[in-house]
Image (tube, rainbow, N blue to C red):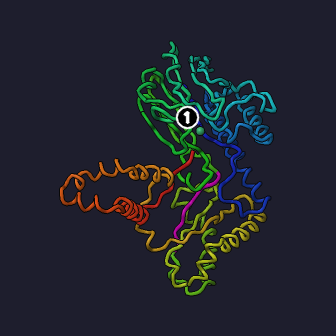
Amino acid sequence: MVKFIHAADLHLDRSFEGLVGMNRNSQMEFLKVNQKVLENLVDIAITEEIDCLILAGDTFHQSRPSLRTQKHFFEQMTRLSEKQIPVFLIFGNHDYYQSDRYWFEFPENVALFTSETVETKQWVTRHGESIAISGFSYTNQWLQRTKVDEFPPRFQVDIHLGIYHGELGKAGNYAPFQLADMTQKGYDYWALGHIHVPTELSLQPPIIYPGTPQGHSQKEERVAGVLLVEIQQGEVIKKAVPIAEVAWITKEVSLKNCRTSQEALAQMAQTDQIGHSVESTDQGLQSNQRALIQLKLKDFEQLGTDFQTSIENHEVVQYLLDKTQQRMSDSYPNASLVWSIELVHQSDERKIKVETSRELANQLFSVYHDPEQFQQILSEIYSHPIAHRLVAESKEFQQEVLQKAQQQIDADFTMGGSEI
Ligand SMILES: [Mn+2]
């Protein structure tokens, strides 16, 4: 049996989005969260006595990780070295490899893939199983061609693993790949990185993104953790193990029982306190985690425009942040905090949320500004003798239709894509 952990997209020195209102000390405290996440990963690797750790790219948020981040990372890898646990690490588009940016030698147990050319490393586990691991690294921000073709066919070994940082598709900036090409290689497992939402692209063979184990923005609300994988005689058993220290939570708060801003403030101030008791069962918050809470306020209309202005100019959220920071200094580390407050107008509630980014939607929409495309989509009207005359005579017809369509889209949908 071979047992390993597949982790990806740790983004170890990435800051937490939306904490700009916090003072420097509190922000620094939050950066320690990333260190704790890595320590959690190493703790699990040691207790589970894994055969190896796979880091499938974007371990660091940038290609020039800070000296402090590097030092901490090397210390943690050394802990694994003391337990004879090897680490196989590729670099992704964020931490693309530049050797001169590292202040220390990587510990000996860390096997690096440092080139864009696919390499295969072979070794035998302490239980005598032979393993081959094939992978490559980014040495630039982009890699605009597929790398799957360069992966060798399955070696004559007990287990052959592929590590791949990239995106599904025929073309793209991040080593695009097709599932069929991967499947063809005959490997036992493909450890993917790059997509932050946990995603299983295939189960036979497993071709899997574990996702980022620690979300750094509200968009990364859904995380699973790292994957603990066991392979025995072709059978693959995998389990997501959470290592996050911070959970992103959205909480709807109705102010319908509040008649004054004092009452409203009291109610909002309570929400971070109940962060633990309520959300921990509600939203899968672990007892050691703290929550970053986004409040969505409903039924506030009776409180008047002054109240709404104070929400919109961030006065209220700053007040709550200051209050929490005080508590953090008393009782760090488990303070949950409200970092954002949004007003949900009744008309917004009916809207459908789509994951597409606004720019992409605009781009798609702009296609119909081309008169030819526009007439094609309305070909029935344009080919009807009477209708044709009506629309052909009006110069503004296309303009008006597009404008109305845009308004309708705005009224029915809210957009917010996820960045990678
Ligand atoms: Mn990436």
Q: Is residue 358 above or below residue 65?
A: below
- Using the image as rendered, state which of residue 41 and residue 365 is in the foreground: 365
Residue 72 lies, in percent from the top left, at 77, 40
The residue under the point 21% across, 60% down is 387
Q: Quadrant of residue 247?
A: bottom right
Residue 94 lies, in percent from the top left, at 65, 38
Ligand 1 quarter of the rendering:
top right
Is 246 magenta? The answer is: yes
Question: What residue span does the magenta drawing correspond to?
Answer: 245-253
Q: Is residue 157 above or below residue 209?
A: above
Residue 391 lies, in percent from the top left, at 28, 60
Dominant secondary structure, magenta? strand
Q: Which three-letter amino acid code belongs to the residue tagged 1?
A: Tyr
- Using the image as rendered, state which of residue 380 and residue 33 is in the foreground: 380
Outermost residue to the left:
385
The residue under the point 72% across, 58% down is 333
Residue 137 lies, in percent from the top left, at 63, 28
- Which residue is label 1 attached to? 174
- Using the image as rendered, state which of residue 399 and residue 217 is in the foreground: 399
- Using the image as rendered, state which of residue 80 and residue 205 is in the foreground: 205
Badge 1 element: loop
Q: Quadrant of residue 131?
A: top right
- Residue 177 is left or right of residue 100, and the answer is left
Examine the rendering and report whether any part of residue 250 can be seen.
yes
The residue under the point 18% across, 60% down is 386
Q: Quadrant of residue 61?
A: top right
Ligand 1 closer than 8 Å to label 1 CB: yes
In the rendered view of the protein, which quadrant contains the C terminus? top right
